[in-house]
């Protein structure tokens, strides 16, 4: 026979299971969490005790409590709080779960002092996205992601808590729903979950994580109200706010990712946690320079297209679909009408507007045709000429147009396509200084590129075994010189920036060789010059549990140190350390080699990544950019080069 649950308040020193309580850590809707000592393992743990009133009123609920703790125990990941034990204590009658204790406090506690730096917010959300990806693979939906359920350890690693209250896709009938009440926290739940928690899936967890991300960036939740019902009313009737409206210093990439996570309709959110994780990793590594790689980069376009589709059905929506129907019963939704308005569908009601717009377009078209017809031979010009002859005052004729620099040098652009990449400037008014006497040769235009300035093409025969790998792709283009002498590190080169970064590290991280163990180096594209001015280095730290110390150097100065930052996106091991004897080619060497593959094309920008490449070891990935005649930057492609010899391993360029 089971003992009735202990009704009195749990005091420090009480023993529940194998744990002796120390103090209370927090209370929730399901139970209370205590800091305790596991008497067998002699470690501190978090002890979660189910509320006695719940287990007394609903014994089946207590069984679900243990069942779902067993489900959560299946997940082992650095970004998920581990469940160590779960049982019913017969001596007290209490149901409890023993979990890993995380001593850094909850994210909600850290947000008491206001918003977080963008880099730290990105790192935390990336860590929880890892946890969601793992839960998704196990077909688990959390349904209550919020800052209170995101814990930070003493190293800053984010960990997701309370997976024990999650819903499993297979055993959904065993989910803990607090006796039928809605599951989740109104300020962070998605509109679909607010309507029916039973239909929640990973996309609803992504919304909740997006709402937590928004609070990390702005210091306040996206929707607020005096009661949960006020908050839910705001959630269901208003578009999701933009973090950039409250904080202008965050990157466009971060703002777009957060907006896509908090889209009011599921179809506009990320399909799964892996897609979200990919965007977060790009934003962490490249910032706005990787904007074109983001899935979220097309969010505004997708939102507009979805809104137009809803309008075609007579349904008015906001940009992120806030007024769209939650669930359509068929493939052809019927138009909806608002109370107190005309029963005419909005499509029909807008016919007058569309008709007026069509008439306006027609008038503009007719006017354009008349202006085009008004050439030198049209009837009005004929009458003006006749009047001028009769009056003896001939009309002044405009001088012929002066050839532009583009026409003067068109033969050069035809011979050298790189010339077309230089944007020409308007021809200034000619002066005496600009029109030298006949015996002085005219000066070359300042905005033109001399043929002698173009990089020389050096035909080199391809070596018999250039790659040292029989499976490597063959090259069908002329190669630059294979051996380029090592150069002295330039001010903006990777080697020079690395020396600066290493001076900011603790002495115990720097090896006796004088260098810290390097995992990865990233050079972001600078729109003002060809080579990067900002370099980010990931250094291995044995004391950081396999994470990386991140240091950014901009213009030769340390802009951000990684003593309190870790790379959640990529846990490292010692095998990921780049061997020093294999890092021989600086970024300037790699750029020179890469430029040799696009002879005659002016390179207007570059970005670099140095890390381990499969089968070849340390390698440079160089991405080249150029500009079209309008001055717009576009990507030429990328080249992968061995870091020791500079030999190419992969070329994907479109000159």
Image: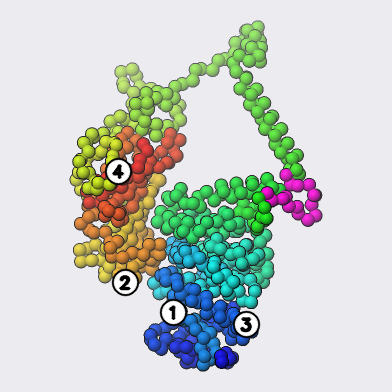
What secondary structure is found at the residue carrying circle 3?
A: loop
Q: Earlier in the sequence, mark 2 or mark 1?
A: 1
Q: Which mark is residue 543?
A: 2
Segment colored magenta: 332-347
Above or below residue 442? Residue 271 is: below
10 Å crowding of disc 4: few (<14), some (14-19), many (20+): few
Q: Which residue is mark 3?
A: 58
What secondary structure is found at the residue carrying circle 1?
A: strand
Q: Which residue is mark 1?
A: 84
Q: Nearer the viewer, residue 434 or 345?
A: 345
Image coordinates of residue 13 in percent, x first then y, are 47, 92
> Looking at the image, do the residues carrying marks 3 and 1 touch, with CB atoms under 8 Å apart?
no
Between the residue at mark 2 and the residue at mark 4, the CA separation in whole angstroms equals: 40 Å
Q: Which residue is mark 4?
A: 473
> Looking at the image, do the residues carrying marks 2 and 1 touch, with CB atoms under 8 Å apart?
no
Between the residue at mark 3 and the residue at mark 2, the CA separation in whole angstroms equals: 47 Å
């Amino acid at each position: 026979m089971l003992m009735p649950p202990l009704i009195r308040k749990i005091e420090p020193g009480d023993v529940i299971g194998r744990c002796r309580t120390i103090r209370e850590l927090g209370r929730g809707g399901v139970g209370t969490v205590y800091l305790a000592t596991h008497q067998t393992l002699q470690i501190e743990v978090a002890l979660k005790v189910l509320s006695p009133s719940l287990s007394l009123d609903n014994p089946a609920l207590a069984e679900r409590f243990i069942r779902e703790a067993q489900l959560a125990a299946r997940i082992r990941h650095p970004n998920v709080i581990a469940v160590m034990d779960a049982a019913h204590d017969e001596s007290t009658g209490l149901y409890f779960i023993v979990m890993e204790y995380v001593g850094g406090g909850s994210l909600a506690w850290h947000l008491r002092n206001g918003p977080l730096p963008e880099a730290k917010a990105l790192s935390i959300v990336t860590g929880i996205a890892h946890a969601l990806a793992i839960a998704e693979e196990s077909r688990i939906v959390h349904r209550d992601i919020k800052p209170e359920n995101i814990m930070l350890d003493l190293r800053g690693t984010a960990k997701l808590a309370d997976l024990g209250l999650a819903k499993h896709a297979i055993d959904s009938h065993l989910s803990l729903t607090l006796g039928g009440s809605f599951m989740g926290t109104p300020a962070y739940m998605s509109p679909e979950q607010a309507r029916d928690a039973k239909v929640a899936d990973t996309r609803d967890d992504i919304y909740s994580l997006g709402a937590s991300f928004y609070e990390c960036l702005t210091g306040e939740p996206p929707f607020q109200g005096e009661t949960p019902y006020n908050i839910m009313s705001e959630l269901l009737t208003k578009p999701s706010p933009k973090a950039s409206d409250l904080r202008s210093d965050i990157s466009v990439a971060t703002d777009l990712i957060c907006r896509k996570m908090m889209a009011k309709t599921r179809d506009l959110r990320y399909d799964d946690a892996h897609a979200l994780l990919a965007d977060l990793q790009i934003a962490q590594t490249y910032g706005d320079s990787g904007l074109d790689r983001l899935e979220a980069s097309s969010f505004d376009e997708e939102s507009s297209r979805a809104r137009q589709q809803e309008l075609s059905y007579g349904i008015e929506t906001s940009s992120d679909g806030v007024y769209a129907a939650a669930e359509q019963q068929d493939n052809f939704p019927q138009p909806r009408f608002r109370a107190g308005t005309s029963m005419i569908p909005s499509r029909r009601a807008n016919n007058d507007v569309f008709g007026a717009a069509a008439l306006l377009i027609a008038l503009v078209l007719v006017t354009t045709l008349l202006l085009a017809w008004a050439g030198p031979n049209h009837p009005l010009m004929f009458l003006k000429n006749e009047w001028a002859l009769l009056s003896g005052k001939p009309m002044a004729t405009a001088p012929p147009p002066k050839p532009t620099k583009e026409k003067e040098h068109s033969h050069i652009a035809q011979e050298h396509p790189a010339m077309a990449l230089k944007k020409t400037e308007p021809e200034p008014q000619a002066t005496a200084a600009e029109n030298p006497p006949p015996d002085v040769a005219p000066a070359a235009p300042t905005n033109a590129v001399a043929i002698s300035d173009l990089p020389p093409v050096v035909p080199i025969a391809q070596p018999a075994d250039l790659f040292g790998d029989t499976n490597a792709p063959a090259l069908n283009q002329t190669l630059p010189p294979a051996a380029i002498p090592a150069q002295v590190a330039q001010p903006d080169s990777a080697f020079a920036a690395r020396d600066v970064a290493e001076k900011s590290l603790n002495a115990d991280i720097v090896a006796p060789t004088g260098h810290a163990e390097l995992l990865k180096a990233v050079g972001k594209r600078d729109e003002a010059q060809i080579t990067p001015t900002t370099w980010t280095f990931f250094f291995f730290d044995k004391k950081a549990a396999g994470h990386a110390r991140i240091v950014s150097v901009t213009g030769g100065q340390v802009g951000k140190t990684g003593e309190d930052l870790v790379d959640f996106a990529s846990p490292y091991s010692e095998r990921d350390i780049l061997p020093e004897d294999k890092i021989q080619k600086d970024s300037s060497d790699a750029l020179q080699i890469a430029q040799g593959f696009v002879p005659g094309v002016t390179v207007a920008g570059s970005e670099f990544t140095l890390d381990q490449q499969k089968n070849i070891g340390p390698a440079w990935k160089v991405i080249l950019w150029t500009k079209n005649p309008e001055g717009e930057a576009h990507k030429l492609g990328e080249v992968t080069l061995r870091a020791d010899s500079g030999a190419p391993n992969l070329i994907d360029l479109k000159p």
